[in-house]
Image (spheres, helix red, strand yellow):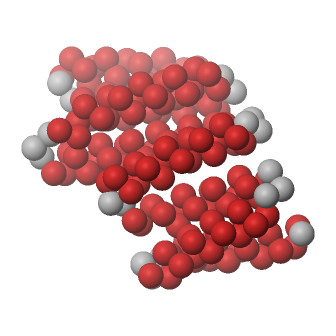
Amino acid sequence: DYENSIHYLRNARETFHRLGDHLGAAEAEMDIGRCYSLLGKIDLALDTLTHSREMYSVLLSATDSLLVSKAQYGILGTYHYSFAALYFVNQFKQALRVLGEYENAVLRFGRRDNMPNLYSNIGLTYSTLGEYEKANEYYLKGLKIAEELNAWDGQLVLLVNLASLYESR
């Protein structure tokens, strides 16, 4: 029951705020956005995920490197959930725009380990749009990085995506 989840997550967010736990509040806000997405309330989901991203962004100036790393990870999560919300309601062009922002954040944060999954999602979106050459390009870029990182799970996903791409042509 996502409505009840949202209710309790709001309470958690407010409690985190009162305690001065800004990371916890940002995480709760992201989870609220995810729930809105699962309810099909895409505009609310995107607004809430954007707000969560802003909450995480404030933490990037912290002196605690672990907190900064968690904030970066949270920001990337908000992009992922925004992409998923748009993709699953067939708003593929908007999903690509969000993935472009996601890519910029990944590069800015130096989170190369996120690249295979990101490029897989970009390839999937282009494939869905029938832009098979672009899909192939991104799948291959992701595969190359996954191989360099020895990320076997990413390699397998991208290999299956490439196989599906060639089956659909």
Position of residue 126 relative to residue 53, above or below, is below
> Is 15 rendered above or below residue 53?
above
Q: In this view, does 159 lie to the left or right of 50?
A: right
**Can residue 91 be seen in this snapshot?**
yes
**Left or right placement of residue 79 versus residue 16 in this view:** right
Seen from the viewer's position, the closer of residues 92 and 15 is: 92
User: Hey, which residue is sitting farthest left in the picture?
Assistant: 63
Who's the residue at 43% across and 50% down the image? Answer: 104
Residue 160: image quadrant is bottom right
Left or right position of 164 against 151:
right
Q: Report x, y in % for residue 83.
A: 60, 42
- If the image is split into quadrants, where does the N terminus sit? top right
Q: 124 and 42: which one is in front?
A: 124
- Front-most of residues 7 and 150: 150
Q: In which quadrant of the rendered image does the C terminus lie? A: bottom right
Residue at (59%, 41%) from the top-left corner? Answer: 97
Residue 113 vertical position relative to residue 8 in the rendered view, above or below: below
Residue 88, visible in the rendered structure: no
Residue at point 77%, 76% (across, down): 163
